[in-house]
Amino acid sequence: MTKIGVVTFPGSLDERDAHRAIRLAGAEPVALWHGDHDLQGVDALVLPGGFSYGDYLRAGAIASISPIMTEVVAAANAGMPVLGICNGFQVLVEAHLLPGGLIRNDHGTFIRRDQVLKVECTDTAWTHQFEQGQDIVIPLKNGEGGYIADAETLAELEGEGRVVFRYRHVNPNGSLNDIAGITNAGRNVVGLMPHPEHAVEPGFGPDTSVAMRSGTDGLKLFTAAIEALQAV
């Protein structure tokens, strides 16, 4: 069975939700600790949401130099699928696996909402089961979710088709170019601010036109990674 590791840092909040999403997708979740140097033979990695190290210094900055990140960076550079969700996205940016940065929401307050996203890139390990241009609904909750990058980096991301998700209808945090998620040049590392692990099971996801809490759009990120690994 495919094994997907979930890294827990001090202050992680959503690692159990990530474990549940992985199980529902059909893989085995493996708990990984920030202080270890052992990925336990996993096939892919998830860096979950939360407030690692209390967001001291900068969100994700201290977590990015945790012992296990040596192995995470090496695995990512070797092509292993890696997904960073919210705080995990911040960690990937701070570890220089993804470009740019995440800053305080432009309205200065924490936001929590069901967010419509436009799928822009479907040739990553995590998004190939979506259709390009598809709208999906994924819960969003962050205080430092504003994506920033210099003009050259933005042009590179846009020109290479590396913007994975874009906010639709409303930009909830001031992210440049409405960017909600990006990928690396190898298409194996994806970071996004919304939380796909909160939209994986009917009765517990966002509201849809079909029924309350019926949204499961997030599950496809996890099933896509499993499919990509099994195809190798």
Image: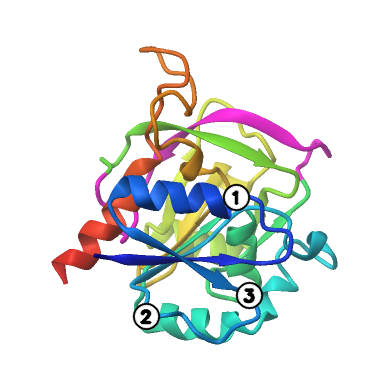
Disc assigned to residue 141: none
Magenta highlight on residue 170 = no
Q: Which residue is mark 1?
A: 14
- Residue, x 23% and y 67% (percent of image)? 229
Q: Which residues are magenta?
A: 105-129
Q: Nearer the viewer, residue 154 or 115?
A: 115
| Mark earlier in primary sequence (2, 3) | 3
Q: Which residue is mark 2?
A: 41
Q: Amino acid at mark 3?
A: His
**Residue 127 seen anywhere in this rendered image of the structure:** no
Secondary structure at numbered mark 2? loop
Q: Which residue is mark 3?
A: 34
Q: Quadrant of residue 30?
A: bottom left
Secondary structure at numbered mark 3? loop
Q: Amino acid at mark 2?
A: Gly
Number of marks in picture:
3
Q: Position of residue 151 (x, y in %)?
A: 61, 61
Neighbour class for label 2 at 10 Å: few (<14), some, many (≥20)? few
In three-dimensional space, the C-alpha distance between marks 2 and 3, rounded to whole angstroms, equals 16 Å
- Residue, x 53% and y 69% (percent of image)? 98
Which image quarter is the C terminus in?
Answer: bottom left
